[in-house]
């Protein structure tokens, strides 16, 4: 699949926030990933109180998941991010992680952030 990113000059500069205004996808294959959190293979979150580190770890997991399907972060069209509790007030670290993971010419068209009270963890 080929993704073309468009950031019209008459819209605000979304690339500074880590996403593109428009992404045109051409091709036949679509891959959906879910549940990419900061856990490693042993379900260790690494840094439970560091939102930036959790975002970086989660994005590395997104990269691994997409690679398993034959793609790369350049192929990601959209992200949905859930942030628990009061961390939603501190999303600068998430923004920095997104900017580090996605260069300006390969940013997703949408990065939606949602606040949730807590996560459900399977037992």
Image: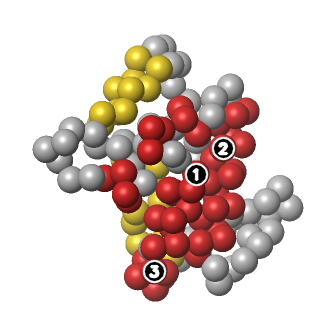
Picture layout, residue 39 above or below residue 33? below
For the C terminus, give its image quadrant. bottom right
Q: Identify which residue is drawn at 37% across, 57% down.
A: 16
Q: In this orientation, does residue 59 appear?
A: yes
Q: Mark 1 near mark 2, Cβ–Cβ under 8 Å?
A: yes
Distance of mark 1 from mark 2, alpha carbons?
A: 9 Å
Distance of mark 2 from mark 3, alpha carbons?
A: 23 Å
SS at circle 1? helix
Q: Nearer the viewer, residue 105 or 108?
A: 105
SS at circle 2? helix
Disc 1 or disc 3, which is closer to the eye?
1
Q: Please, which residue is most extreme toward the top here? A: 28
Picture layout, residue 117 above or below residue 66? below
Q: Pointer 1: residues within 10 angstroms few (<14), some, or many (20+)? A: some
The quadrant holding residue 52 is bottom right
Residue 43 image offset from top left, x and y in percent: 79, 64
Q: Which residue is mark 1?
A: 101
Q: Please, which residue is most extreme toward the left here? A: 10
Q: In the rendering, which numbered label is found on residue 90?
A: 3
SS at circle 3? helix
Mark nearer the N terminus (2 vs 3):
2
Q: Pointer 2: residues within 10 angstroms few (<14), some, or many (20+)? A: some
Q: In this orientation, does residue 82 appear?
A: no
Q: Identify which residue is drawn at 48% across, 14% down.
A: 28
Distance of mark 1 from mark 3, alpha carbons?
A: 18 Å
The quadrant holding residue 72 is top right
Disc 1 or disc 2, which is closer to the eye?
1
């Amino acid at each position: 699949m080929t993704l073309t990113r468009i950031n019209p000059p008459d819209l605000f500069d979304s690339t500074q926030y880590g996403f593109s205004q428009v992404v045109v996808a051409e091709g036949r294959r679509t891959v959906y990933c879910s549940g990419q959190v900061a856990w490693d293979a042993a379900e260790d979150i690494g840094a439970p109180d560091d939102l930036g580190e959790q975002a970086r770890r989660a994005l590395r997991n997104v990269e691994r998941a997409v690679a398993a399907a034959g793609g790369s972060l350049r192929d990601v069209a959209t992200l949905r991010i859930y942030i628990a509790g009061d961390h939603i007030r501190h999303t600068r670290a998430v923004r920095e992680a997104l900017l580090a993971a996605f260069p300006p010419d390969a940013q997703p068209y949408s990065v939606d952030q949602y606040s949730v009270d807590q996560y459900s963890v399977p037992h």
